[in-house]
Image (cartoon, grey):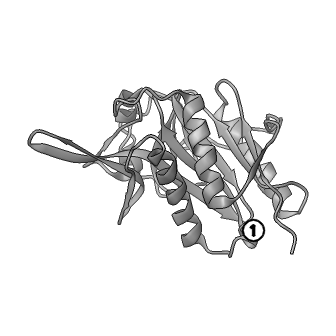
Amino acid sequence: MNAPDPIGWAVSPGLTPYPDAVAVMEARAAQIAAGEAGELAWLVEHPPLYTAGVSARPGDLLAPERFPVFRSARGGQFTYHGPGQRVVYVMLDLRRRGRDVQRFVADLERWLIAALARFNVEGAVRPGRVGVWVERKGPGWSREDKIAAIGVRLRKWISFHGVALNVEPDLEHFTGIVPCGIAEHGVTSLVDLGLPVTMDEADAALRAAFESVFGPTANAPCPLRATAAPAAPAFGEK
């Protein structure tokens, strides 16, 4: 049995417009399904924006005029993307990986937890709360804050959308939404935890941890920007 091809690993410089990213993912997922392209993990940063997943509740958008708001086909509710947050769009062929959605989501969680461990950060998952969380303690207090989000979609057993790790985003920007519909917990980042981690260092940790979970990677060119009409309408549009 032949070993699977390495998964492409591409990093886009600068800030990638969200509608372009969605159109690229849609096209790549279709190509993977047709056997015309290989699997890909695509790392981007976005300008400040909010996205509304398929379960988003309008009341969880607290500041609708603050940043652009896009409807998203991924699972989940509202989330924020912006500079200092590493978004990884994961386009994998689950036909080769057991066709097991729960296992795939658990693998995404294991990947993020393993990446955080490289900075001696103990990440964890919690029943009923999607994403990866860290426990924070001080004299007489403790709480759990979210450090990474997960939101994926499958089409013909090809995954797209993915994960978002907070490296050094402006955490105040999260106050315009109820992140993932969870109001009783906060949001944090590696830098907020006191770790002066650069994006390059975060990328290196993400790649090493990704390979430990999903298999070897190989450098790939950045996907071309889509020339089609935007694939992510503003929230509230039909």
Q: Position of residue 205 (x, y in %)?
A: 56, 42
Crowd class of label 1 (few under 14; some 14 to 19; many from 20; radius 10 Å)? few
Name the quarter where the N terminus is drawn: bottom right
Tally of numbered discs? 1
Q: Position of residue 104 (x, y in %)?
A: 59, 66
Which residue is depicted at the point 47% across and 33% down?
167
Q: Position of residue 144 (x, y in %)?
A: 27, 48
144 with respect to 204 (left or right)? left
Dividing the picture into quarters, in which one does residue 42 lie? top right
- Residue toward you, 48 or 65: 48
Which residue is depicted at the point 62% across and 74% down?
100
Helix, strand or loop for disc 1: loop
Q: Residue furthest left?
A: 140
Q: Which residue is mark 1?
A: 156
Which residue is depicted at the point 54% across and 71% down?
102
Amino acid under disc 1:
Lys
- The vertical placement of 110 against 235, above or below, is below
Dividing the picture into quarters, in which one does residue 141 lie? top left
- Residue toward you, 76 or 137: 137
Q: Position of residue 37 (x, y in %)?
A: 87, 54
Dividing the picture into quarters, in which one does residue 96 lie? bottom right
- Residue toward you, 232 or 27: 27
